[in-house]
Image: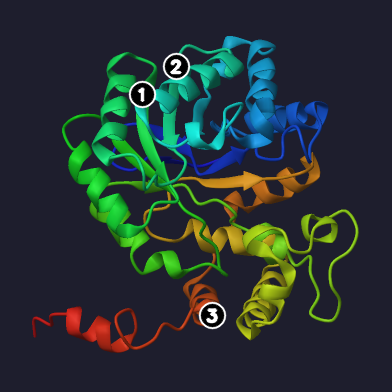
């Protein structure tokens, strides 16, 4: 495993995090604990969970694993969770209010069986709650010792800028968790620069695009069987029909396969290595159903793609924005040559 600084903080984290969204639904407790054991043995340090994962069951599974392992293992773990969405409360009670976040944080700590989190992240923007109210609670959570660092998840660029400006000097806001992969590069237009400008390390989720970048799916047939889209073809942002009708999808997958064959690696490993090379990425969140998938993905840690392969992947995955404001004309106007 390799390690990096988390944003502008003094914390060192492994370059791959273990995402636990599958725990309690797609992965049984036995499989989940086996993943945690393997991840710890490989030198991984970041366990990434959320109260909404399996309606709290994911945190409980992680908590029982922590309770059953020695301090040599558990003390090395950097424990991260998130709150915002309704878990055991009506939807109207959710959000980023002081009332909801206080209860959500305490419930997460209880399920995990710990007295503090290394990283507590707000799971998404709340258009109802004033931002100052949210930040006031996060300041209290750090001051009380329940939280060491604070992070954002699924914020837009202007939201990151507002939060970072208001948080400065009050508590350590250190990370931003976006969807980021070869099929979802639009975050590079505003979200990545806003994170970089404010010293936030990126913790990308869905680095394999829900299995697309692992080479699981075919252009000629809808997925079937024991895969996420085989069981639910219209699942979330990676829905089969929407991505399958975009020619860019297949262009990216062709180049990923070409690079993988050249290096004797899997498509997933190449896709992870590309993301690991991107600016501001601190730790990539791996979410796996099985220990076999996790082991294969962790093997990407020593793959450093040469410039030529990175350039091929960049060109194939370019989301091709309109000329203004993110395309060539906008970039040219924002540039300032010095010679």
Q: Nearer the viewer, mark 3 or mark 2?
A: 2
Image disc number at residue 148: 1
Q: Residues within 10 Å of mark 2 (few under 14, many from 20)?
A: many
Q: Tag 1, which secondary structure?
A: strand
Q: Nearer the viewer, mark 1 or mark 3?
A: 1
Q: Tag 2, which secondary structure?
A: loop
- Left or right relative to 332: residue 217: right
Distance (Cα) linking label 1 and label 3: 40 Å
Q: Tag 3, which secondary structure?
A: helix
Q: Quadrant of the N terminus?
A: top right
| Mark found first going from the N terminus, 2 or 1 | 2
Distance (Cα) linking label 2 and label 1: 8 Å
Tell whether label 1 touches label 2 (CB within 8 Å): yes
Residue most extreme to the left: 338
- Left or right relative to 331: residue 327: right
- Left or right relative to 99: residue 214: right
Image disc number at residue 312: 3
Image disc number at residue 116: 2
Q: Nearer the viewer, residue 196 or 92?
A: 92
Can you give x and y, in whole percent of width and height, for residue 45 in the image? 54, 31
Tell whether label 2 touches label 3 (CB within 8 Å): no
Can you give x and y, in whole percent of width and height, for residue 226 in the image? 88, 53
Distance (Cα) linking label 3 and label 2: 44 Å
- Say if residue 323 shows up in the picture: yes
Can you give x and y, in whole percent of width and height, for residue 286 in the image? 62, 46
| Mark found first going from the N terminus, 3 or 2 | 2
Q: Quadrant of residue 69?
A: top right
């Amino acid at each position: 495993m390799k390690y990096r600084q988390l944003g502008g903080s003094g914390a060192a984290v492994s370059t791959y995090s273990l995402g636990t969204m599958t725990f309690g639904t797609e992965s049984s407790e036995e499989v989940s604990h086996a993943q945690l054991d393997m991840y710890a043995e490989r030198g991984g340090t970041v366990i990434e969970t959320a109260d909404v994962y399996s309606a709290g069951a994911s945190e409980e599974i992680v908590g029982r694993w922590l309770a059953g392992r020695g301090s040599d293992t558990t003390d090395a773990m950097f424990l991260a969770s998130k709150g915002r969405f309704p878990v055991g409360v009506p939807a109207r009670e959710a959000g980023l209010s002081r009332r909801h976040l206080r209860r959500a944080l305490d419930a997460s700590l209880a399920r995990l069986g710990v007295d503090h989190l290394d990283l507590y992240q707000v799971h998404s923007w709340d258009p109802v709650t004033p931002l100052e109210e949210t930040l006031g609670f996060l300041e209290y959570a750090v001051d009380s010792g329940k939280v060491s660092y604070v992070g954002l998840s699924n914020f837009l660029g202007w939201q990151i800028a507002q939060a970072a400006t208001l948080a400065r000097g009050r508590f350590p806001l250190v990370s931003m968790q976006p969807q980021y992969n070869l099929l979802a590069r639009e975050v590079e237009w505003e979200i990545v620069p806003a994170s970089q400008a404010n010293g936030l390390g990126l913790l990308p989720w869905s680095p394999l695009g829900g299995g697309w970048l692992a080479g699981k799916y075919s252009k000629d047939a809808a997925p079937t069987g024991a895969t996420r889209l085989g069981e639910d073809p219209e699942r979330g942002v990676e829905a089969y029909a929407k991505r399958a009708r975009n020619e860019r999808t297949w262009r990216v997958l062709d180049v990923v396969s070409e690079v993988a064959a050249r290096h004797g690696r899997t498509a997933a490993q190449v896709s992870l290595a590309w993301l690991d090379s991107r600016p501001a990425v601190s730790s990539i969140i791996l979410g796996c159903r099985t220990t076999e998938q996790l082991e294969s993905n962790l093997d990407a840690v020593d793959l450093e793609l040469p410039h030529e392969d990175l350039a091929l992947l960049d060109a194939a995955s370019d989301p091709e924005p309109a000329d203004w404001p993110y395309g060539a004309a906008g970039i040219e106007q924002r540039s300032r040559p010095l010679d």
